[in-house]
Image: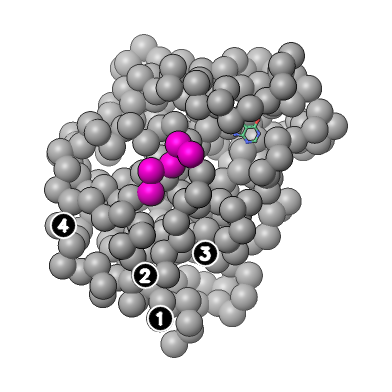
Amino acid sequence: MSKIYENLENMLSGLRERIPFTPQIGLVLGSGLGGFAEKLKVAAEIPYQDIPGFPVSTVSGHAGKFVFGTLQGKDILCMQGRVHFYEGYSMQQVVTPVRLMAMMGIKTLILTNAAGGVNSSFEPGNLMCIRDHISCFVPSPLIGRNVLELGTRFPDMSCVYDPELCGALHRAAALRGLSLKDGIYIQLSGPGYETPAEIRMCASLGADAVGMSTAVEAMAARHAGLRVCGVSLITNMASGISKTPLSHTEVQETANRASRDFEGLMEEFLGLL
Ligand code: HPA
């Protein structure tokens, strides 16, 4: 058995008695969006640091725990906080939580993040349904000996973000009277924000939003056969488009301001699944 799979099995067996139910849906809450977990009727919480070998976030705004709870009749496993490549973790470590959630039984994964707006028609506070991604500026999380128990060597990536789930996201937005953009998310490594030249490159490649997470998690999830969708909260216009210097404080402030829209969208969406 591969070391990666052995580690995952060890994590899972260490957690068994703390897992209250088999979750149907996994939800990764990005920067400033962790408050959504408070809407759940919580059945159990497991701080990441209680899981030996599990990567723990070092970024402010990321709480760092699994929350098992129900909402809209669905059994949900929320991740309040994730880890990033820029924290020094390998991409294999970055996707460990997604793989563990798949082993805990989720069939659908909802990824969320705070992102910079590359599409100049976007505004801070906009929500974007991720239709596709560009991940090739960061290492693939699937590099290394393939773990057959997790998925196939050469997984198809022609339809990472499930069109039906995207349709449901748009229905949910309409029901709540919210505007929901569509776009392509590009993952870069961070932690520095991009230069204006890099953002022009992203735009010329067809990206609409830029961030430092999500695409590799989506790849690992597709490798594991999960249905995937993603929502970006545009917290700022990207470098060179924004008139002001970028800061994590601005990202968090916009996320706080727009979190009600985000939470409304998510709650309605979960009801449609
Ligand atoms: N760039 C990269 N990541 C981000 C940004 C950005 O402008 N905003 C929020 N996350």
Q: Distance between the residues labelled 3 and 4?
A: 25 Å
The disc labelled 4 sits on which kind of residue? Phe
Taking 250 as reference, is 142 above or below it? below
Secondary structure category for the residue under label 2? loop
Query: Which residue bears the numbered disc 1?
Result: 6
Q: How far apart are marks 4 and 2 (CA)?
A: 21 Å
In front: label 2 or label 3: 2
Q: How crowded is mark 2: few (under 14 residues within 10 Å), some or many (20 or more)?
A: few
Task: Name the N-terminal-most of marks 1 and 2.
Answer: 1
Q: How far apart are marks 2 and 3 (CA)?
A: 13 Å
Residue 92: image location, x then y, percent? 55, 66
Tell me which secondary structure the magenta stretch mostly adopts: loop
Q: In this view, does 186 lie to the left or right of 102?
A: right
In which quadrant will I find the C terminus? top left
Query: Which residue bears the numbered disc 4?
Result: 21
Q: Give the range drawn in magenta.
A: 60-64
